[in-house]
Amino acid sequence: MPVCSICGHVRTEDAHVKPRDTFDDRQDDLTGNIIPLCPTHHDEFDAGKIGILLSKTGFLVIEEGILKHYESKMNLHHLRDEYVFERNQSCDLKLRLRLGMIASASYLRFDKPLS
């Protein structure tokens, strides 16, 4: 039984890394594109509050204004690199900074309030 890739909760939904609506009817939107997430983390993921580390070993999550790192509860190496990159491009600015997608942001540290 799959568990949430972030918190390990057993009630999960299939979350699309690259949004389903960006595929046309002939394209496979499942292969290399699905991770199990609990309903709470799925909503936060879709809202851009969760980024996937480019190493595919974990996540950066904004929780109550604090940036936190979570090791993945499952292997994420099946995800297509371009889907991870596209997903992270739609994340909150502070996540994109910390993921290295925007110029250096060494001032953003884990477990510190975000302003």
Image (tube, rainbow, N blue to C red):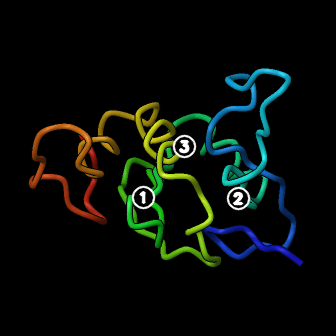
Dot 3 surroundings within 10 Å: few (below 14), some, or many (20 or more)? Answer: some
Between circles 1 and 3, the one closer to the viewer is: 3
Residue 12, by quadrant, is bottom right
Between circles 3 and 2, the one closer to the viewer is: 3
Q: Position of residue 67 (x, y in %)?
A: 36, 56
Residue type highlighted by circle 1: Leu
Q: Where is residue 23 in the image (x, y as percent from the top left)?
A: 72, 26
Residue plotted at (26% across, 42% down): 101
Residue 44, by quadrant, is top right
35 vs 93, left or right, is right
Q: Are marks 3 and 2 in contact (CB under 8 Å)?
A: no
Between circles 1 and 2, the one closer to the viewer is: 2
Which residue corresponds to mark 3?
83
Location of the C terminus by quadrant is top left
Q: Residue 37 carries which label?
A: none
Dot 1 surroundings within 10 Å: few (below 14), some, or many (20 or more)? Answer: many
Gap in Å between the C-alphas at discs 1 and 2?
Answer: 15 Å
> In front here: 98 or 83?
83
Vertically, is 20 above or below 56?
above
For mark 2, give the secondary structure: strand
Residue type highlighted by circle 3: Tyr
Residue plotted at (39% across, 63% down): 68
Which residue corresponds to mark 1?
60
9 vs 46, left or right, is right
Residue type highlighted by circle 2: Ile
Q: Where is residue 84 in the image (x, y as percent from the top left)?
A: 50, 48
- Mark 1 vs 2, N-terminal side: 2
Location of the N terminus by quadrant is bottom right
Q: Which mark is residue 35?
A: 2
